[in-house]
Amino acid sequence: MAKGKSRKAAKREDGSREEEGEMKERSKERIGNEGKEYDDGGSKPQPPVARKQQRSTRNVRGRGREGGGRGRMPVHYVVLPALLFGGVAIVVYFGEMWWAGPGVNKPLPLPRAVSETWRNDSVYLTRLWGTYRSNVYFGIRPRVPRSLLAGIMWYSNDGSGRMEIRHSCQHGDDLRQYGWIRHDGTSYGQQRIVDHEMMLETEFLTMANTSLGETWSARIRGKPLSQRPILTSLIVYLFNEGKGEMAYRTSGGQRSLEEVYGHTPEFRQFRLYLPRKTVADDAHHSYLAARVASPTHLDSFFKSVMVVEEGPRTWPPLPSLPGEITPDDGGPLKPNLVAYQVTTTVPFELDIVMETGLFSTVMSVSGERLSSALEKKEKNFDLRFEDTFHLKEKGFNESEIDCARAAFSNLIGGISYFFGQSKVISRDLDEPVDYWPAELYTGVPSRSFFPRGFLWDEGFHQLLVAHWDTSITKDVLAHWLDLINSEGWIPREQILGHEARSKVPPEFIVQHNENANPPTFFLTMETLLSRMESEGRVDM
């Protein structure tokens, strides 16, 4: 067996030698031919590598011409540039992410829904001023960042020495009732506040909102709920959050405030005055002019600066506003807060008028004209409420309809305006960061506990508001959509501005981008689209 293998191996070795000899002969013959071509004046012999590439190219071209196949580029010509390009893209992307930081506080890079064109629209301007400070019992402001804030506060002078000032809506105030009984969301509101032995009614009316000028009027009326005399102090104030100047004029021995006036970048001129005061003949008047850091806790500030003054013989000592409060540095006073206080027996009635812009272009309303305008607004509201919801037609009685009007009015009357920056955080951050400065026009779930915007609550709120005024709903939606960040997230709870933040414990202020709310705005959008379809409209 071993011997057979040796013979076979020998044969294979002989065959290999013969093949090797033939290859050498062919190689010599090829070299000779190439030398001959060169000697005859032909081209210089090419290196082996160049000849190999030439044959490869000739073969590819030949196959293309003959139709037997298509020319193919080497794979590495495609793969390597693709890998290079992809690598550069990845480096640029992550480098940009590293440089720009997490997207939790970056706005979505799209045009804003609330544009300058929108702001100049006549419908938008009709809601420029309103009761947009739902956190206080009665507060008025424009939908302008860092602007003018007006409001009232009151307390009972019962001789006990306690000053339980009512200003910010507080469950601890133990009021028997407070809330809107009529509010149209635009230009009219009527509120009733029952505070133990006194009922306070506040009414609000806007008369003109144009590019030239705006005006609004308010009526504050106190009514007794008991037979014994009630002594009450009412404070009306105006605070400027932003730039501008403020001054005032007094009368009556320099104790009674007649008007506050000045200018701001947004409204040019402004003037707030009290043209009608139906108070007791022996009413006590005082005022305050000061500069304060923010509008939060104004009631505590007023209480801290009060001075005790003597009133009429039968009245107890009266805490009163001190007049001008000079700055600590002794420099000239540049007030951003001016307030008027009247202490009187109940009943009483005051009209407040605010004018901005070019005063000559607007007509202020007070006295009998205001009474007539408010009466007309009340009747129109009741008619519109029935035309919208058809409760009387459905068989509800007057008491039930009154309840429904109040429920709806508190919903739409709670719509407020906020401006500020949320505090947000993500798992990519060690510390909270500020969201971008933003405006928000939205309803609130509760004036006392939650006077701020909540994402999923607002989707439900607007289901009802859309039946009343679709322009308000679209306005609210636009403001919320402008809060979407580059990750597609909206902070579920909007705590914007000093007043909103003052009502939230510090541990609940920061919003985490892993917390979200159900997308209830789709319900609102579906309602809007259904109404448009039923009305044959195609525009939003």
Image: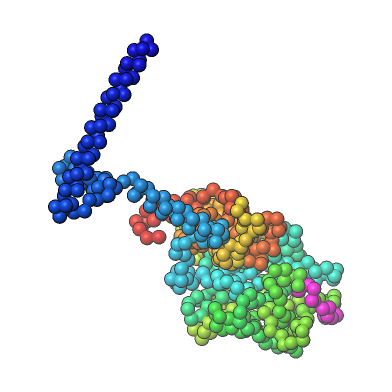
Q: Taking 138 as reference, is 81 left or right?
A: left
Kindly indicate the quadrant of the structure image that contains residue 194: bottom right
Where is residue 455? Give x, y as percent: 56, 54
Q: Give whichever of 46, 222 is nearer the camera.
A: 46
Q: Residue at x 35, y 58 (%)?
A: 538
Residue 272, relative to residue 464: is it above or below?
Answer: below
Q: Residue 312 lies in magenta, yes or no?
A: yes
Q: Give whichever of 97, 374 is nearer the camera.
A: 97
Q: Residue 168 lies in magenta, yes or no?
A: no
Kindly indicate the quadrant of the structure image that contains residue 371: bottom right
Q: Taking 174 as reference, is 75 left or right?
A: left
Q: Residue at x 28, y 28 (%)?
A: 17
Where is residue 98? Give x, y as percent: 55, 58
Q: Residue at x 29, y 47 (%)?
A: 49
Residue 80, relative to residue 95: is it above or below?
Answer: above
Whether residue 131 is visible, yes or no, is: yes
Residue 473, relative to residue 349: is it above or below?
Answer: above
Q: In this view, which residue lies farthest toward the top?
A: 1
Whether residue 472 is visible, yes or no, is: no
Q: Give whichever of 446, 382 is nearer the camera.
A: 446
Q: State the extent of the magenta-drawn residues as a range.
A: 302-314
Quadrant, the C terminus: bottom left
Where is residue 116? Give x, y as percent: 46, 71
Q: Residue at x 71, y 79 (%)?
A: 291
The colouring scheme, among rainbow, by chain, secondary structure or one colour, is rainbow
Q: Taking 215 as reference, is 296 left or right?
A: right
Quadrant, the N terminus: top left
Where is residue 47? Give x, y as percent: 27, 49
Kindly indicate the quadrant of the structure image that contains residue 270: bottom right
